Amino acid sequence: MKQLQLVEMPESPVLSVGSITDLIKQKLETDPKLKGIKVRGEVSNFTASSAGHFYFTMKDEDAELPCVMFASSASKVKFDVQTGMGVIAYGNVTVYKDKGKYQLLVTEMEPDGLGTLYAEFLKLQDKLRKEGLFDTAVKREIPQMPMTIGVVTSLQAAALRDILNVLKRRWPVAEVIISPAYVQGNGAAGTICEALERLEHLPTLTGGKKIDVAIVSRGGGSLEDLWAFNEECLARTIRATSFPVVSGVGHETDVTICDHAADYRAPTPSAAAEVVVPVLEDELQQLDDILWTMDEIMVRRLEALEDEVANDLRLLESFSPSQRIHDQTAELERTKKQMDTAMVTVLDCAETDLARLSQRLDDLAPLQVLDRGYAIVTKQDAVVGKAGELATNDDIEIMFTDGEAEAKVSRIKLKKEGDKDE
């Protein structure tokens, strides 16, 4: 049986984590070789905080170096820092005690050409753009009310939960078909293409159901994390689908080949879901407004038609034989009444004139003259108007108002010219 032998440890002080970290910090931050240094590398995982600070990693083929650039220095940078670009950073190596890690505190930075991945990205982007894959003319419209929506992303992605929540809240009437894929790592681009192809063949698998629109999505990350969405095969698969595709990859500052090839680019996964569907309540309200407007239009149109029919009936009645007979009969009655009235008026006037003339005749009648003291002389039943019509010894009759007398002419005395009537 073996016996354990105790080895005596050399005596040394026991240090705390903070103490050893302070010691490391002092060693690194006082080393003149780590002050005012220049570091060349490719920017990765770049983010800018709301306070204006830059956080990123510089890397090359051998290692990675965490970097921080505070707002006072970041505000002096004269170019847009992006993941994938090459830079030369100036600064000091420091230790971030709380996390126990060293970093480069950058005070100045200048561009140093493009990083390998970013250069590859620009090369492919230029190639596909020249082929016309990104042209506005080839973009398809997003349907206003999609009923079958495809979603291509990882089943474990937070982006999937965000998308499903938005779709359920805004447009619960749609059916969502999830076609899972890997969204990061080697071969991920191929699985995304396969997921889109499964959606393309959905009518065959389901017996007629067809995708109205699809969302390709994942959350944010570095250029390397998002590289699956910068593959040429994905761009060509998107353009080959029969349905429009909305890209919701990363954050607003992340731009991928997928974004350019898609029919619409949304800044985030949630925004992609909002672009794809309307709000059900808004659509129902709009439908109610349309129905109300149509009802008002129909009521006004029916009223107008009723007026037109009434006018046409009146016009038809005006041309119908019975109406014309009725109108002419009424006109005849009016004319008859007018003639009767005119005849009564004429007879009244004639009667008045006759009475006046009768009175005049009565005034001029011989008998009326006799009443005024005159007499009528006749000879052989002929009225004697002048003395020259008589001869001496003519028998004459004299008529008075109250009788007659017979006489014989004994003497005739005629007026001479120039004699005046007394």
Image (spheres, rainbow, N blue to C red):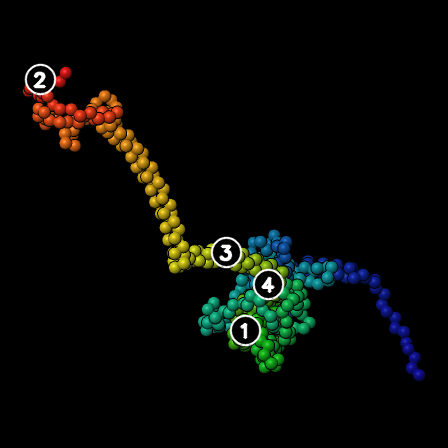
Which residue is at a point 23% across and 21% down the rendered structure image? 373
Cα separation between marks 4 and 1: 18 Å
- Write down the residue under mark 3: 303
The residue at the point 11 percent across, 26 percent down is 394
Q: Is residue 375 above or below residue 112?
A: above
Contact flag, marks 1 and 2 (Cβ < 8 Å): no
Q: Is residue 329 visible?
A: yes
Q: Amino acid at mark 1?
A: Phe
Local crowd size for mark 2, using a 10 Å CA cut-off: few (<14), some (14–19), many (≥20) = few
Whether label 3 touches label 4, CB < 8 Å: no
Residue that numbered label 2 is attached to: 419
Earlier sequence position, callout 1 versus callout 2: 1
- Alpha carbons under labels 3 and 4: distance apart: 37 Å
The C terminus, quarter of image: top left
Nearer to me, 262 or 401: 401
CA gap, disc 1 and disc 2: 142 Å
Badge 4 is on which residue?
278
Dot 2 falls on a residue whose secondary structure is: loop
At label 3, the amino acid type is Glu
Question: The disc labelled 2 sits on which kind of residue?
Answer: Asp
Q: Quadrant of the N terminus?
A: bottom right
Inspect this view and state whether residue 59 appears.
Answer: no
Please name which of the two marks, 3 or 2, marks the residue nearer to the observer.
2
Q: Earlier along the polypeptide chain: callout 3 or callout 2?
A: 3
Q: Farthest bottom residue?
A: 1
Q: Nearer the viewer, residue 344 or 332?
A: 344
Per the model, the C-alpha gap separating discs 3 and 2 is 101 Å
Question: Which residue has dot 1 on it?
Answer: 243
